[in-house]
Image (cartoon, coloured by chain):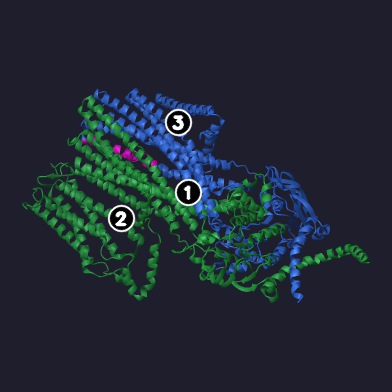
Chain colours: A blue, B green
Amino acid sequence: MVNKNSKKRTKQNALGNETEKASFALTVEHERDGNVEQISRRSAWQDFRRKVCLLVPYMWPRGSVWLQVLVILCVGLLGLERVINVFVPIYSRNIVNQLSAMENWRTLAITVCVYVLLKFFQGGGVGTSGFVSNLRSFLWTHVQQYTSRVVQVRLFAHLHGLSLRWHLGRRTGDVLRSIDRGTSSVNNLLSYIVFSIVPTIADIVIAIIYFVTYFSAWFGLIVFICMFLYLTLTIIITEWRTKYRREMNTQDNNAKSKAVDSLLNFETVKYYNSEGFEVRRFEDAILKYQACEWKTNASLALLNQTQNLIIGLGLLAGSLLCAYYVTVDKFQVGDYVLFGTYIVQLYTPLNWFGTYYRMIQSAFVDMESMFDLLTEEKEVKDTVNAGDLSFTKGRVDFKNVCFSYTAGKEILSDVSFTVMPGQTFALVGPSGSGKSTIIRLLFRFYDVQSGCILIDGQDIAKVRQNSLRSYIGVVPQDTVLFNDNIRENIRYGRISASDQEVEEAAVAADIHDKILSLPDGYDTEVGERGLKLSGGEKQRVAIARTILKSPRIILLDEATSALDSQTERNIQASLAKVCANHTTLVVAHRLSTIVSSDQILVLHDGRIAEQGRHEELLAKGGLYAAMWLKQQQTPESEVSTEEQPQEP
Amino acid sequence: MVEMKSFCEAGVSMQQVWVEGGLTLCFYFTLVPSVLLTLLFLFGTLLCIWYSRYGTDMEPKFVPRSGLYRLQVGLSVLLILQALGWMVFRLSWSAELPGYVVLYGCLSMLGWIWAVVLLRLERRKVLVRDRTRGHSTVLLLYWAVAFAADNLAFVSWMSPQWWWSLETSEQQMEFAFWLVRYFCSGLLFLLGLKAPGLPRRPYMLLVNEDERDVEHGAPLLGNSDEDQSTWKDFGKKVRLLVPYMWPKGSVLLQLLVLMCLGMLGIERAINVFVPIYYKNIVNQLTDGSSWKTLAMTVCVYCLLKFLQGGGAGASGFVSNLRSFLWIRVQQYTNRVVQVRLFAHLHALSLRWHLGRRTGDVLRSIDRGTSSINSLLSYIVFSIFPTIADIVIAIVYFISNFNAWFGLIVFVCMALYLTLTIFITEWRTKYRRDMNTQDNNAKSKAVDSLLNFETVKYYNAESYEVGRFEDAILKYQVSEWKTNASLALLNQTQNLIIGLGLLTGSLLCAYFVTEGKFQVGDYVLFGTYIIQLYTPLNWFGTYYRMIQNSFIDMESMFKLFTEEEEVKDEVNAGNLYFRQGKVEFENVFFSYTQGKEILKDVSFTVLPGQTVALVGQSGSGKSTIIRLLFRFYDVQGGCIKIDGQDISKVKQSSLRAHIGVVPQDTVLFNDNIRDNIRYGRVTATDQEVEEAAIAADIHDKIIGFPDGYETQVGERGLKLSGGEKQRVAIARTILKAPQIILLDEATSALDTQTERNIQASLAKVCANRTTVVVAHRLSTIIGADVILVLRDGQIVERGRHEELLAKGGLYSDMWQKQQQAQDSDSASDSETKDRKSEKLQPQTSTTAHRGH
């Protein structure tokens, strides 16, 4: 007993060492290839230890004793399978020997029944559908589901925690693909490593020990050499074809992204008669993908043939040797049958070993993409000891704020201003002068590079984002709606609101009558990103959301730019009521809408060029006055037009 | 007491099937009930599934009362009793009871009981789609085979073991039992042809004739549409699949297909010889053959094994080579389907795109494309080869072993397939539900990520994560049911395989002990059965995957069958553009039933004219532009360009002449240069920059660090609203269309930029037919004609001055805008006063000059 165990451990260590040596050799080879090639041929096994560390927490389901019991039970069933795999060929041998020796029927019948029972437990030879394996798969479902759910939810929460900058630059198609593949890869890795690779290697080690003990050292040697060659060549070839696999994934992502982008821009494609162009572009992307796919599959065929050749040679050597021993009466006929059965039984899952190795590699690649998402740093983070914003009156201070989206292109330069509680501030200036940026900074989509923003004397960079945002309502310039009915879209402002409150907000936003006139009323479904509603209707939904939210600070980013005059007047009245006694920042193009503001800031190239009330700025005769005069020119031309009919 | 010593009678070997000029009784009485029960179980189960899923109870008054039906039942009961009686007779007559007597009695009783159950089922239930009268094929087949089996007794006319000589009382009793069976089964078959227990006319006709039950007819028909089987329209789906198996247009690929099929045949031959050679090795070892012969046999065996693979059948040399060659064919199919589907989606109407969910569509595309390749792989390279192997094995066992083994293999395979199909059908609903939940979860993720900013605006991250987790939990409940039912399926299959292996192994071992077989024959049987069962384990998986693939293909072909709402007519020609006169004549349109957007709209835009559309939000202004662009077709009236009805010309030629600057601009995930170039894909960089200059965005672009190479985020979110609209204007300038549609093109711009753009647009629109939708009346004062829309109708039309003079709706809108200006004017009065004071010295100077 002790000897067997020590031999088993020795063999396992030997195999492990061989694998490590192979990995080390590959690493050395990579170093000699130079930096550039090394980067492009980065092995999936790089950071192997780090990846395994990432993987382990998902195998042991913390927080659920029931699932932990299931894990232990599954591992126990794995051990049981190993025992069964030894006894099946042994009983097969016993049957043949008893038949040769003409044993009595009773003994023979019992042996056959036991053999069939073992076969029932083992399955039809593939090892994946026997009773024990089936039971283990059944029990493992819950563990797998737990893992899958945890990973997906954690990743999803993380994505929503990332910054606006990241979201503006991402491609949804790529992200979704990484999520899908990453989630599958975690489960696949667990399945392949724990339930396929480890059991297979255990079976091989047990077989070698058995052959050395009960047959002769030659058989153990044959099995060992074949397995070693098999594993080595499998690893080498699979490493070699990794680059094809990666490239295939990249091309697949490209093709899918093109499809997504094109479908999302359906109207633009129609506007420019570009269906043919899009189809050709899509086909080109698929052709590129399929060129990579062919290389991947061709290299897979090579891998399979190499494995098959090694297995064939091993079977040939062992069979000839065994047959020879039988002819010289060292073995019985049943021993030949045992060898044949056992070797075929070993090789069957080994055929899958190459596939599992490749799938593990692919899963590592996919997991890599997913964990890249998980390790994407949140640009705007709450500091460790951040507290809640203590809202008192609503005073907003910008002090010496400098900000740029990218290095070298400063959007805001040394901006300072103060909004007193209850005041209405207006921001005006040419497009791209930084007006919307100020709103985004106040909402803390980004952090300032220098200076600070205070609310009631508290630096917003040092308070929790959640608490900051709960006090601020934004009516954006470009409204997007969810794929849901109108009621739910408005209710998004405050999810706990009742239907009556939703309707009151819609009335205040002057969209209630419009909603009722729709055939489905408030239950009307709006299409993706609200494309079914007109621009004005979408903006009124956004206004209704904000009204429902009842924030303390209101940011209006050209909130009524898409409305007609009559509707705008109605909305302005409602907004005036909503904004009364609230601190308000307005970004507007139409100067007429901000005449009554307490303060008007005129922005130019990221700086505050002028500041004051409407009358003051006009009196000053600067940039604002010029803008105002330009808007006045239009009415004057109208007046002059009107005068003409009077002359007759 | 009675002692059961052996399966057959004493002295009769199980190996013998034909002795003394006739079949052995043992074989005959095992064959008949086994085959009958297997057939009935196989097809009867399918029939029960069919009736339970699609059948409905027949109203009692339509069930015909018939004495012949009772006769049918009586005859079946009599057959049950005769089987029992025969067993009792054999027991009482002889002290020794062979096993086959018990087998025959039990199986026969089971078979006829089941037949009675089916008979009553067909009488009480009716398939709504039933167009025929009479019994199902299943029952007719059962009765026919039973009658044929009784006729089979005649082939043993000469055998002394049978009862034909009638010499002893035992033989006379046997003859009597046979007569009962013969008469009853024959009469059942004849009565079955007449079907007295079923309505003579289709059930639905009977229902329709009875006026009082007409209302109930519709629900019956409606119910049948729900819970469709995956195999519904199976023929249609196969026809959809066939064109993708044979790659038209490429002789090389066709040769590859033929080669792959040829290799399938080679694999079948190899699968027979592998166990044969294994048997030869064992026999030669037992016989002590010479080493040379033995070594030769071992080498051949290993070579065959190399060609076959390690037992899984999926990675042998031949299989590997076939897979390698198949790559090209698969890729061709994959590419054709994806490109065709993609082109089809872009041909669908705006209405469909507005209502779709991108996540669902993309998933259907992915799964549908994969499903076609999966179906081809599974059916051609897995199912057919497996069934072929089974048939070959049965033939081999009957020829070279014994009919018993063929019977065992046949019964096991039939049971296996029956239960596999039965359980897989049962778990289809779990699978469909799982797919639905998966789509829901993914759609929620997509929707949430696309609305990232809105989620932030309302601090709804936790809400979104909670909703996402709920969706995943629902998915996983369905997933668990799917996996649990899969486990049940696997265990059932495993049990049948185990029983078959047990029966065959025991029988084979028995024959070896009796000296009828050699040791190698046992090894051959074991090896061959396991070899058969290995791919059969996958059969359940393949069946399920085929089912899944059909479901996925179903979703994809639904996209294909989505009708293009706006279609070019068969003989549609190109729009022959001359001057650009646009006419709307009595146009009616609604997006959905009951909500009319446009009512009897008529107007004309003369060549080179600018027409402005004004009115409340939602009054139909943007709809007119969409109709002119032909995103939708009108319900009444017509739209003409240069006298040609746009619904009768090709859409692409119509759109080639129209440029649109939309209200809500979206950009592609690409750099700015390519976004502008989208207006005319063939334009040069210089032309792109000229268009940008004309749209007053060139300086802004140059100001970016990456200039024209700057990447814009998804749907152009990185640019401000004004910047996006100027990109859209640049696209249109680059396209240089003859008709320009401006849908509030400058609504997101500031005053200064708007003025610049207006100047550029004025240049672009000069001498071009232009339709403008605007909120700011100031921007359309110069229009040739202004149409005022309200509730889908044109209530006023004319030039600016005319409409003001008229004092109607337009005048009111204008006055309201003026009020805003007046409040500004009030502020201006002080300023003007101050200026007056400053100007006085100049006046004096002027007066002085006057002097």
**Reading the chain from its start, which is encountered first: label 1 or label 3?**
3
Q: Secondary structure at mark 1?
A: helix
- The residue to which callout 2 is attached is B45
- B413 left or right, relative to A431: left
Q: Position of residue B619 (x, y in %)?
A: 61, 69
Task: Say the numbered circle drawn on residue A236.
Answer: 3
Please provide the residue range marked out in magenta: A105-133
Say which quarter of the image contains residue B458: bottom right
Callout 3, which amino acid?
Answer: Ile
In this view, A594 is above or below A440: below
Q: CA distance from mark 1 to mark 2?
A: 47 Å
- The residue to which callout 1 is attached is A283
Task: Say the numbered circle drawn on residue B808.
Answer: none
Q: Residue at x 23, y 59 (%)?
A: B140
Do badges 1 and 3 share one subunit?
Answer: yes
Q: CA distance from mark 2 to mark 3?
A: 52 Å
On the question of residue B723 being in view, the answer is yes
Q: Position of residue A341 (x, y in %)?
A: 31, 33
Say which quadrant the C terminus of chain B sits in.
bottom right
Q: Position of residue A364 (x, y in %)?
A: 50, 38
Total numbered labels: 3
- Tell me the crowding category of disc 1: few under 14, some 14 to 19, or many 20 or more residues within 10 angstroms, Cα based: some
Mark nearest the camera among 1 and 3 is 1
